[in-house]
């Protein structure tokens, strides 16, 4: 199923305008998620919207927004009133200015989006805006309304498209001074810095996000697969501590020794991970799944045995069983 646009409207630079659609550049849908269930019945927990005073359930039609001004005192604000104060950015991303990318503090970054032409018209205007931003090596700053709130958005070229990153307002960013003022100003010796730099050099490499592994997600999938298969779950042994370190210098020296021992294994792990990533990229695209069908990716053992497996393989389900993924690459060492 094609991704759904979060917003559709127009991108405008002065008198140059084109229809565009905004799509989220990231997703959490592949992560394992849980529902709350009743331990006794196994049924899912359902939440109701109730009146805090009477305890009666309230329908969606009777629910409005309210701003709390005092205990049990609220100023009611209707949807029409909110629509009336919305700016032109409700339907248009107006480019207000261009700034150097280096000037944008990373603390202001929220989340990335892909901005693409909407439909068959407007590609020329879209390309003009994209290449203008690219040629000037700057970031375009505009405004867009998402979920009834106006956001600042920074636009920059990404291959043949545009990436938009939502930015925070100044009142949303906390000052670092209230956190850093109590940090002690310590004196470091040259030997300590040289040892630390040596460790950094040994661990330095290119940014390769395809080698990252979510260890917790992998452990969750393994746990669910084991429980679904009827395998026994054993408690994890407590991690061994490295013992007390006498001094910072001793810790640095010990770290260098550990890095030397781990270097060969780390190199093998990185090469294996790269090869796995390449093989995955070259693999053929899977056929589109027919709605209602589900592949039997994991044999079921325990109660029911083969009969349960056969039944599961032939019974359509509305949703796929996510916890069947296996790590497709080696863990990045170091």
Image (cartoon, helix red, strand yellow):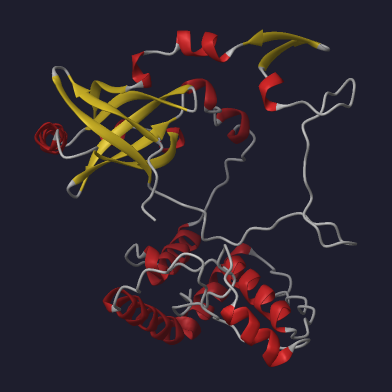
Quadrant of the drawing holding the N terminus:
bottom left
Is residue 155 shown left or right of residue 42?
A: left
Nearer to the camera, 193 or 71: 71
Q: Nearer the viewer, residue 236 or 164?
A: 164
Residue that sits furthest to the bottom in the current view: 306
Q: Is residue 300 left or right of residue 190?
A: right
Residue 51 in the image: above or below residue 213: above
Q: Where residue 23 appears, x then y in whole percent?
A: 36, 42
| Residue 314 image point, x, y percent | 57, 80
Say left or right for 105 vs 60.
left
Name the quadrant containing residue 198: bottom left
Judge whether residue 63 can be spotted in this image.
no
Residue 162: image quadrant is top left
Closest to the observer, 233 or 133: 233
Q: Is residue 287 positioned above or below 92 on the image?
A: below
Q: Residue at x 67, y 9 (%)?
A: 76
Above or below, 68 relative to 160: above
Q: In this view of the protein, can residue 259 be seen by the observer?
A: yes
Please give the name of the residue rendered at 62% of the width and 10% of the height, measured from the top-left corner: 77
> Which residue is at 52% across, 55% downward?
29
Note whether 172 is above or below 34 in the view shown.
Answer: above
Could you tell me which residue is drawn at 35 percent across and 65 percent down?
Answer: 208
Residue 320: image location, x then y, percent? 55, 67
């Amino acid at each position: 199923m094609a991704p759904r646009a979060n917003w559709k409207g127009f991108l405008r630079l002065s008198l140059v305008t084109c229809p565009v659609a905004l799509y989220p550049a990231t997703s959490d849908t592949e992560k394992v998620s849980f529902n709350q269930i009743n331990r006794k019945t196994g049924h899912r927990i359902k939440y109701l919207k109730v009146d805090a005073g009477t305890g009666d359930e309230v329908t969606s039609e009777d629910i409005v927004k309210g701003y709390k001004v005092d205990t049990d005192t609220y100023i009611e604000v209707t949807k029409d009133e909110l629509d009336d104060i919305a700016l032109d950015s409700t339907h248009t991303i107006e480019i207000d200015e261009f700034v150097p990318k280096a000037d944008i503090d990373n603390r202001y970054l929220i989340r990335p989006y892909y901005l693409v032409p909407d439909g068959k018209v407007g590609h020329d205007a879209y390309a003009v805006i994209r290449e203008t931003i690219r040629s000037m090596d700057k970031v375009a700053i505009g405004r867009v309304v998402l979920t009834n709130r106006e956001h600042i958005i920074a636009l920059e070229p990404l291959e043949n498209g545009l990436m938009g990153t939502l930015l925070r307002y100044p009142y949303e960013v906390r000052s670092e001074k209230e956190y850093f003022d109590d940090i002690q100003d310590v004196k470091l010796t040259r030997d300590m810095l040289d040892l630390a730099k040596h460790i950094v050099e040994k661990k330095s490499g290119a940014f390769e996000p395809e080698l990252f592994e979510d260890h917790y997600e992998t452990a969750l999938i393994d746990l669910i697969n084991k429980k679904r298969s009827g395998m026994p779950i054993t408690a994890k042994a407590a991690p061994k501590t490295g013992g007390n370190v006498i001094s910072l210098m001793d810790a640095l020296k010990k770290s260098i020794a550990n890095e030397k021992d781990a270097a060969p294994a780390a190199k093998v792990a990185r090469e294996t991970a790269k090869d796995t990533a390449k093989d995955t990229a070259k693999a053929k695209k899977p056929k589109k799944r027919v709605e209602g069908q589900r592949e039997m990716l994991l044999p079921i053992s325990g109660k029911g045995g083969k009969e349960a497996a056969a039944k599961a393989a032939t019974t359509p389900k509305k949703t796929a069983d996510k916890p069947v993924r296996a790590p497709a690459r080696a863990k990045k060492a170091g």
